[in-house]
Image (cartoon, rainbow, N blue to C red):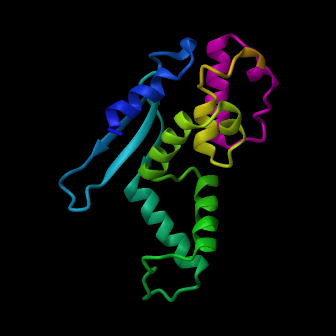
Amino acid sequence: MKWSQLRHQVENRFADSIAGRVSIHNARYRTFWWGASRVWIEIDKTQVINMSWMTGGGEFDKEAHRLMNLKPTQRVPWTVPPHIETAVKTILASRSVFSNQDAVNAFQDFLMNPVENNLKSENPLLRALSMLDRKVGKRRLKSLNAKEEHPLVRQLYEFRCKAEGIGL
């Protein structure tokens, strides 16, 4: 699916109370031979999170290097063992470090999965997007407890509650 179609479908799933206030963007930098890009989410024209290949990929390599106990002169292999990859992604997600591909995958999952699955997902990006979903109504927002959530999920939850007129 083209980026413009994905963006349009994701933004159309946002609640009416926040329509036009939340937007997602993608920039592709063609001057780099690998086609580096970044994805970011804005609320009221203020960037909330930035997800880029350069930060996400670089941090992934650093953490994988550390977890694999490689010498400083050794490079991280192209294929990282699955248990290392899972551990690295968990560590990076807890620090809100995501790549642009993580964002695109979350957007696609957001559209394909039922809202109940998205809210229970281990992916904080998916849970954060779920806070903006039109299928999450006022009653469900009131019943959610976002105090122990990932900072991005908590931020979007508080934004949505404020937009809906729900006191925290």
Determine if the magenta segment contains residue 141. Answer: yes
Q: Residue at x 39, y 56 (%)?
A: 53
> Residue 128: which quarter of the image?
top right
- In percent of width and height, residue 104 lies at 44, 44
Residue 22 in sight: no
For this rendering, which residue is in front, 13 or 42? 13
**153 displayed left or right of 101:** right
Would residue 113 be counted in the magenta stretch?
no
| Residue under the image location 58 percent in, 81 percent down | 68
Q: In the rendered structure, which segment of residues is drawn in magenta?
A: 140-168
Q: State the quadrant of the C terminus.
A: top right
Q: Residue at x 26, y 61 (%)?
A: 34
The secondary structure that dominates the magenta segment is helix
Above or below: residue 138 compared with residue 1 = above
Q: Residue at x 30, y 42 (%)?
A: 27
Front residue of this view, candidates 19 and 45: 19
Question: Which residue appears farthest toward the left when viewing the image?
Answer: 31
